[in-house]
Amino acid sequence: MLTLRRFLATLGPGTLWLVAFLALPLLVMLGYSLLTRTDLAQVGPPWTLENWGRVFGYDALFQEWVTDNLRVLGRSVWIAAASTLLCVLMGYPLAFYIARQGARRKNLLLLLLIIPFWTNFLIRVYAWILILRPFGLVPSTAATFLGMVYAFLPFFVLPVYASAEKVDWRLLEAAQDLGASPVRAFLAAVFPQTLPGLVAGLLLTFIPALGTFVVSDILGGAKTALIGNLVQNQFGQAGDWPYGSALSFLLMGVVLLGLWLYARTAGQKGLEELV
């Protein structure tokens, strides 16, 4: 009884929250993915696996395989990965620059980094149309990349900054005293200390970039439609909730596959440090 009370007092609220707002919605979506959309845009029986077949490219109506979803998924992964790489190239040095400043200047730079969050995300994306339209960049893939980097760069910089601020620079001095070149000393003494923040930044950037639909819809147009746009369209204009639910599970599966690959390649220790 005492153990049950401790559980209810400590893990109970968190467990209840996860069940109510994560497990139950997933079960509802799973149920919807097995239902059928009628001609009147209603959802109901009979139960079917047709939506899952459509997700993986099988058209039951014409009894043939199509690759539209796989092309959209591949484009989504490529754009999300490229946007994440751009955030790494820009955000990693920026995080170190902020971490090496004095307290007053550091606070100012962090404030400038998070100020865009004070404005609605949709308004900020639309503002890029006014900026890029005179250059003829809207709609385009380049505008999509720019919008994603602008949107997700702070999510990468902040965790890397948290790690960079805790770096023990004495290890760098020791490596240089032992004859290591500046690059080798950095990779051996400093980079491992920032690895937890780097991994957190990668995940916080890649996962939302993979599922986004606002940036690609506004700045990219139809030619850069991503898997998020496809899901959003099924729940919106098309009204095909069963198919949209199945597509959502496909997106979650890709994310979980990426996390599993990370755990296999980078090791369970890195994942534990991230958590």
Image: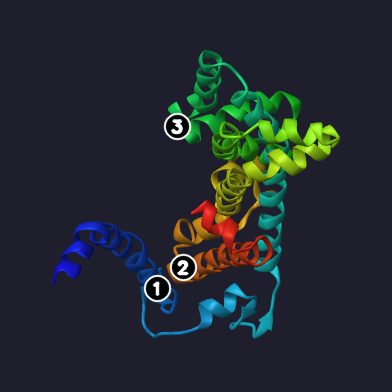
- In the picture, residue 87 is in which quadrant? top right
Kind of residue indicated by mark 1: Tyr
User: Measuring 49% from the left and 30% from the top, which residue is drawn there?
Assistant: 123
- In the picture, residue 86 is in which quadrant? top right
Which residue matches tag 1?
32
Q: Is residue 140 visible?
A: no
Kind of residue indicated by mark 3: Asn
**Contact, mark 1 vs mark 2 (Cβ under 8 Å):** yes
What element does badge 3 sit on?
loop
Which residue matches tag 2?
245
Which residue matches tag 3?
120
Q: Position of residue 252 (x, y in %)?
A: 53, 64
Kind of residue indicated by mark 2: Ser
How crowded is the residue under tag 1: few (<14 C-alpha within 10 Å), some, or many (20+)? many
Measured Cα–Cα span from mark 1 to mark 2: 6 Å
Q: Is residue 130 above or below residue 92?
A: above
Q: Is residue 238 above or below residue 198?
A: below
What element does badge 2 sit on?
helix
Please identify the quadrant where the N terminus is shown. Answer: bottom left
Q: How many marks?
A: 3
In the rendered structure, the answer to whether residue 71 lies left or right of residue 103 reads right
User: Measuring 63% from the left and 80% from the top, which residue is drawn there?
Assistant: 58
Q: Position of residue 107 (x, y in %)?
A: 50, 19
Q: Which color scheme did the rendering employ for the protein?
A: rainbow
